[in-house]
Image (cartoon, rainbow, N blue to C red):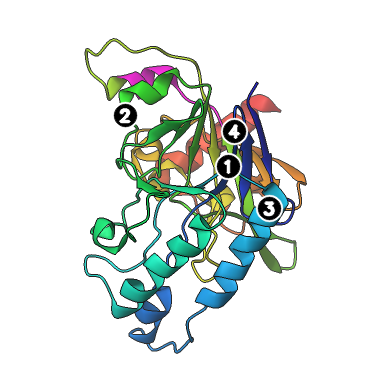
Amino acid sequence: MIDIVPLLDAPALVVKNEDISLVIADVHLGIEYDLYYSGINIPSQLAGRIERARRYVGEAKPDRIILLGDIKHNVPHISHQEEEEVPLFLNELAKHALVEIVPGNHDGGIDALLPRNPDVILHEAKGAIIDGVAYFHGHTWPGPSLLNCKYWIMSHNHPTIKLTDNVGHTITRQAWIRARLDEGEVKKNYGQEKLEWNDPEVIIVPSFNELCGGIAFNESWHDDLLGPLFTSQAIRLEEAQVYLLDGTYMGTIDSLRKYSREKYKVPGNKARAYRRRKRYRH
């Protein structure tokens, strides 16, 4: 039986089946290089990220560590910082467990940065089934074989929620998103292929890198979010459930929209549709 539990107060997921997998996403090594050329001077945070990853490993005691895309940051080129930090980070993780990488949209050319280490494995961008669970970054449609899995774990959008009170004070918190899929919209992408459908639950992982920022899901509509599962409206966004890193259940995206400072700025037909749904519900 597959058991999926986030580490408490951490953007890391523990998946238990035959083995124990520790999942982290959006590491974005080399982001400091990009920030420097944008006028923000921050020294490398690699040491702190390695220490944090070691702490997660110590808590989870995994058989494998799954890196769910965007291990490196700069695109399309590879910075000197990434040339140094990516192999170092991967080798450090591989001291503790097998490392399996599911590449993201920032990971072009990452194969050239992989250390010569048999405990570091690179999968295809369309995702991989690992110990019975489907993993993909989210910038592409998952491979058709993943549709038969009960759980899809993805990243890419760095999910947060943003809550605004009546006097305009706003707080933003990282969040886990658990959602279901529209079977018809998903299958449209795969044409005439015969697909085995297991009505998977989608779990969207928050960003490991503290400098990445995020997208406030309760202030976003399908077109605001990244990746074909959102732009096609295959993910049932309004009924998606939101959890904070400390485990607090916050409600659905729909219920959290009332705390959004953008609630009166929904464009065009979306605003009318949103008001109409509210009217019919109440």
Marker disc for residue 259? 3
Indicate yes or no whether the magenta region holds residue 181.
yes
Q: Earlier in the sequence, mark 1 or mark 3?
A: 1
Distance of label 1 from label 3 (alpha carbons): 41 Å
Quadrant in the rendering for residue 20: top right
Q: CA distance from mark 4 to mark 2?
A: 23 Å
Q: 10 Å neighbourhood of mark 4: few (<14), some, or many (≥20)?
A: few
**Percent x, y of residue 74:** 31, 69
Quadrant that contains the C terminus: top right
Front residue of 247 and 58: 58
- Pointer 3: residues within 10 angstroms few (<14), some, or many (20+)? some
Q: Mark 4 highlights which residue?
A: 19
Identify the disc placed on residue 140: none
Q: In the shown orientation, is residue 132 left or right of residue 258?
A: left
Q: Residue 143: which numbered mark, if any? A: 2
Bounds of the magenta segment: 179-187
Spatial CA span between label 2 and label 1: 25 Å
Q: Find numbered disc 1 in the image and state the secondary structure of the residue it sits on.
A: loop
- Location of residue 238 by image quarter: top right
Which mark is first along the chain, 2 or 3? 2
Rendered image quadrant of residue 146? top left
Disc 3 on helix, strand or loop?
helix
Query: Going 38% across and 66% down the picture, which residue do you hit?
Result: 87
Query: Decide: marks 4, 1 in contact (CB < 8 A)?
Result: yes
What's the residue at 74%, 61% (across, down)? 165
Label 2 Cα crowd, 10 Å radius (few <14 / some 14-19 / many 20+): some
Could you tell me which residue is drawn at 45 percent across and 89 percent down?
41
User: What residue would you read off at disc 1?
Assistant: 63
For the residue pair 204 and 98, the one nearer the viewer reads as 98
Q: In the image, 250: left or right of 269?
A: right
